[in-house]
Every structure is written in structure tokens, then in C-alpha cells.
Amino acid sequence: VKPWLAATIAMFTVAFVPSALLDARAQRAEASESSVKAAFLYKFANYIEWPPAAFATPASPMVIGVVGADEIGAELDRIVPGRAVNGHPVSVKRVREGDPLRGIHLLFIGKGQGSLAQLLRSAQGQSVLTVTETDRGLEMGSAINFVPAGERIAFEVSLEAAEKSGHRISSRMLSVARRVLGKSS
Amino acid sequence: MIALVARSLRLKVLLLVMATTAAALTLSAIGLVIYDLRAYERQWTNDLGTQAELLARTSAAALSFGDRETTAKDLAVLRVRPRVMAAAIYTRDGDLFATYTKPNRTNEVFPARPESDGYRIEGDELLMYRTVVEGNEPIGTIYLRALYLPWDRLRDYLGILAAVMVASFGVAALLSGWLQKRVTQPILDVTGIAREVMAHRDYSLRARKTTDDEIGELVDSFNAMLAEAGRRAEALREADRRKDEFLATLAHELRNPLAPIRNALEILRMPESNPAMREKARQMMERQLAQMVRLVDDLLDVSRITTGKLGIRKSVVEVQAAVRDAIDTVRPFVESRNHQLEVQLPSQPISVEGDRTRMAQVFANLLHNAAKYTEPGGYITLSLAREGDEAVVRVRDNGLGLAPESLVAIFDMFVQVDRSLERAQAGLGVGLTLSRQLVTLHGGTLAARSDGIGKGSEFTVRLPLAGATLPEIDVATPRGRGTQSRRILLADDNTDFANSLAAVLTSRGHDVRVARDGAEALATAARFTPDFAFLDIGMPKVHGYEVARRLRELPAMAECVLVAVTGWGQEDDRNRAREAGFDRHLVKPVAAEDIDTILDSF
């Protein structure tokens, strides 16, 4: 074995392998983040008490609307089929800005969505519970907001916003929330 | 210890009570412990299951949203359950998500993967798994490990049981003490009385009755037994006394005739005595001898009564004949006392079934008593009458009479009303006992009646009439061949008796041989070939039955008349004699006249 060849291989190894590994890890973290958030969205439904008028019948679907988050939408499409919350089959609906929010129970507004404030107001008026993933999302009027917590995803809850849209959030879920904004009163 | 228990009723009772108590307590304790162990398991698993369920609900959200800290905080609630050693929550994929360990414990090892729902007891630990559900979806598993210590409870139980056992034994001891007072003490009292009675022969002692239960019955029975034993002892003493008196009387009575007989013998020996004197002496000897024979006959009858061997030969008998026999017997005595005897017999024959000789004996005895207990010159009547289907014989006198209390006692053995009188009049005091016995054997009754002392007495014999009045057949009617000479063998170990009898028979022209025992009898018979053989049954060497059997086997002896001579006239003896080949049977003592009768009948 020639020393120089060994040295060269060692150099390449030191220079490229770590960067390749880091890349792969970043990609996986992103994918994992989307799937976690999608799972959370679906799970939130278990801990939310909907207004009486939200469902026409006990078997009416529970619709999760997604706007500005294609990856999470795709992930939801993957996990939702065949699942139900309190007897309501869960379905996913892609929403664009300006679309009517009628029939949607839970609306996730992704990072990529520009007119956040307007969407939030509109959703609040139509008894739709909103979930965002923005800094200060709750302050902008969102009921639930994803926040990073180290390697995990956490969430925070605004009781005020939830109440405005006519929802009650289970205390068990609140016990897990990173931050809970109290009611306005 | 065992010997002690075997001897003490109290210890037995105590042991019984304690054994029963211990058995009952142990059994109930085993039952309770089994029940409690099961109840403990059920209760504890329910309890832990509830806890697991609560934790599952509480921590579902935290698990669901991946919040380890919150989950751990939820689990930390278990601090208030000191028996829970460790707990953990696994994710749906089976990875350990959050754990709890009891404070101050380290090195807790959690199962790598959860098991399916349920619980399991491992040593002194209870392991429980329960699925955490969100909505309808299982999202993980909760694991609890808790101490499972039924043995503590068991120990408590055994402690309580021991305390109860000790208390029960105490109660048992008290109970047995009480029982001892109620049961053993009365028994010991009875035993004590029994000992005292044995020691002092005092049958008047009585055990005290304290209860009405079985012990009370025992005491009653014991007292009744004492009374009976007392009566028996008294009766024995009385019988003993009577026998002593009887023996004294007997000796006296047997001795009395001997003096006149000796005197008579002296007169006979005297050369200067004339024929008239000799005849007088001879008559005196005959009278005295007759008196002795009567005494000894009575004595034999007494022993037959006491051994139950007095028997009668039944045939149809005319009562008049028996009465005449009796009068013949007693007339000399009655006349010697200058009594007037009046006899009233119906001309119509009255027949009963019975033994003429024995019946005559009864009537003679009654007449003899009447003559004896009436001052000389008295008046005696005997009447026979038919009353209903009974023949009634009454013997009346105007003599001493009887006190009312004596009316029953006179029939007892050896009783004489007036012993001072008895001294003068002779007798053994067995006559009435014998008479009543004989009448009873005939199916009749004998009763006494008197108006009191000095007012005479009346004895009444009642005998059932025979079914038909058949004439008496006297089998012993002489055939009138009295003068014929016979060849006679007498076998008896009493040689005086045999020789004297032989002398009498020889004097009447018979050819007589004497044998002293069975063997000699056989030898003599073979040589002598007698016409008649009188064989004593109780002979030495070969007894009479055997001699008879062997004689019958000899061809020369085929025609010989065999006569058995026994002490007892029992039916059994007669049968046995017949079977042995005897033709006739005589009861001792044998008189020359008895032999004449038999010789004449062949």
C-alpha cells in the first residue's frame, strides 16, 4: 500500500463523508418534521370539543384543511385514510387563499402562506380552529401554534382564540402544551 | 401422659373440647386465609388496574404529542403509592418512552418491550400492563410494578388466629372444669360410695343425685343396685342363719333316735330278757328307725328341691286313694297324741293327674303338722270336695293356730313357727316347703289360713281335676309269684348295704351274689348268669350304665332283668337307664320291699 494513496483517501474521507452525512440528516429532519406535524394535526382532533353545529350527523367527516404546506398535506393524505375521530371519518382538503372555508373543521396554515392574518380572521369567523407554525402565531390570532423545541416539535395554545371560534381544548392536551395563552377575560 | 389421660375422664373431656376447638378454628382459619388471599389478589389488581387506567388517560396526550417530561411528571404521581416500585410508558412501537422509579431506588431495570394487557404475579411483585388509548387508537402501553405482599396479611391472620386459639383453649379449660363438676364429680362420688360399701358392707349408703341427666340416671340405677344388693345380702344372711339352725336341728334329730335304738340293742343282748321285752325292744327300734328314715327322706327331698331335681311321675290318680295312704301313714302318730281325726270323703271318685305317692306325702305332712301343733286330745278334720274343676282337700285343727305374719313365712325353707315347741316335737322345718313345691308341681296351690294364735289353722290344697276320670292303672300289681327262688346279683360299692340286703334276700330263699364295683359285677354276672341284676350307677371302675351295656351284649344275659339304682329319680336318669338297657329303675334308698315288688312283677 502506498502511503500517499492512503493519505489521499483519508483526506477525501475527512472532507466529504461528514458533509454528505449532514445533508442526509437535514433532509430526514425536514421530512420527519412534516410527518410529526401532520400526526399532531390529526391527534389534536381527539382533544378538541367542537361546537354542536360543526357536524351535520354523527357520521359526518371531520375535515382538516391545509393551506400553504404541501408536504404536510401529502403526509396527512398518507396517514388519514381509514382513520376516524369520535366516529367522524377524517378527510383532508387542500385550500387556497380565497376559497370558502365552509365544511372545514381544522385549518392548518403553513409557513409558506403570506396573508396569514386575513386567513386567521376569516377562519375565526366561520368556527374553524386554526393551527399555525409561525413565531408569535398565537399573538396573531391562531388557536394552536407549532414551535420547535430542540429536536422535538412542541405546540402552544391560545384559549382565547379557541374560544372565539367556539372550541374547547382538553386540559390533557393543555398539560402538554409548551405555552397556554389565557382567556381574554 | 397417655396413662394419665386414659385414667382421667376430665382430661379426656378437656382434650376433646380442645381438639374440637383447634380443629374448628384451624379449618375456619384455612378457609378465611384462602378467601382472603384471593380477595387480596382481586382487590390489589383492581386497585392497580384503576391506577394504570387513570395514568393511561392522564398521560395519553403527553405520549401522543411525544412530551416525555410531562409523561414523566404524570407518572411521578405514583409517589403517593408506596407499594408501586416502578412504572413506565412505552410508545406504540414498543420503545421505552418515560419511566418512574420509587424514590431511593436505583438500578431499576425495565422490560425492553411491553407485554400484552394483563397482570402477572412474580414472587412478591405484581406486574401489570395496560394499553394507552387515544380516541379509539392504541398509542402505547403503561407498565406498573408493585409489591405484592399477601404474606403480611397472612402473618396478621395467623397472629389473630393464635390469639383466638389461646382464648378458645382458655374457654375450653373453663368448660371442662365445669363439666368436671357436672359429670366427673358425681361419678367420683358414686365410685367413692361404691368403695365405702365394699369396705364396710353398709348397703344403706346412697349416692347423692345432683342432676336429672344421664348421670342422674346412673346415680338412680346405682342406688337401686345398692338397695338390691342390700336385700340380697340380707337374704343371704337370713338363708345362712336358717341353714345353721337347720344343721343344728338335723344333728339333734339324727342323734335323738340313736339312744333308744342302742338301749333296745342292749335289751336284745341281755340273756335274761323275755320274748315280750324283746318284741317291745324290736318295735321301738323299728319306730325310731322309721323316724330316722323319714328324716333322711325329707333331707333328700330338700336337696332335690334346692337343686331343682324334685320330679313327679304323672298318672291319673284318685284323690281318695292318696288320702287313705296318708291317713295310714300318720294314724299311729295321731293316735299317740290322742287326737280325734274325722275324714270326709265323697263316695264319687275324684281324679287328678299326679303322683299318688307324692300327693299322699303332702296330705300326710299336713295331717302330721296338725297333730303336732295341736295339744293332745285335739280335733282334726280332713275333707275332700270337688269345687268347680278343682279337687279341694282341707285339713283343719283346733290347735295352736298361726299369727297373720306367719301365714306366708311358714312355707319358707327351714322355718318353724315355734322353735321351743320344735325341740319337743322333732322335724326339720322343711315339710311345708316340700308340700307346697309338690302341689305346685301338680299344677295346684297350697294355702294356710288361721283366725289367730290359739284358734286353730286350716290348710287347703287345690288340685286341677284330670281331664277324664280314668281308673288308676297300677303297673306294680304283684303277680303272686312271691315264693319263687331267683338268682340275684347285687352290685354296690356300699358293701354293708349290699351284704345286709343280700342276707335279707337269701333268707327269703333267693340265690344272691354281691359285687363291689363294676368290673366285679361283670365278672360275677358272666359266671353266675343271674335272673335279676341290681346295679348301682355310681360304682367305681366301671359305672352302672356301662355294666348294663356290656351285660346286654352277653347272650346268656339276654333274659336277665336289669334294675338301675340311682340317687335321683329324674326323668333324664330314667331315660339314660332305659337307653343303657335297664328294665327297671329304683331310687335310693332301696328297701327289701322294693326288690320284692320287682321280683314279683316278673
Image (spheres, rainbow, N blue to C red):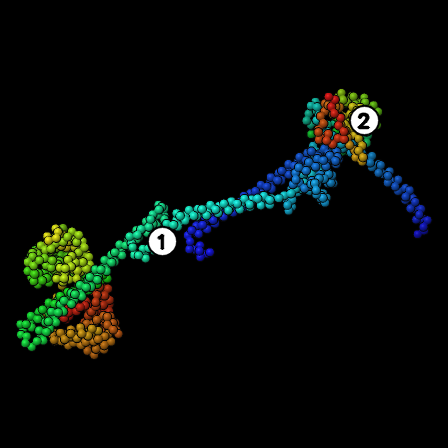
Question: Would you name the residue on which mark 1 appears?
Answer: B191
User: Marks 1/2: CA distance?
Assistant: 111 Å
Residue A8 sits above or below residue A113 on the image:
below
Residue at point 78%, 21% (across, down): A122
Q: Nearer the viewer, residue B271 or B37?
A: B271
Q: Where is residue A41 in the image (x, y as percent from the top left)?
A: 76, 30
Local SS, label 1: helix
Q: Which chain carries label 1?
A: B
Name the quadrant of the C terminus of chain A.
top right
Most distant residue in the bottom direction: B527
Q: Quadrant of residue A51?
A: top right
- The answer to whether residue A67 is left or right of residue B220 is right
Residue at the outermost right position: A4
Residue B261 as seen in the image, left or right of residue A177: left
Location of mark 2 (residue): A136
As drawn, B295 above or below A29: below
Number of callouts in the render? Answer: 2
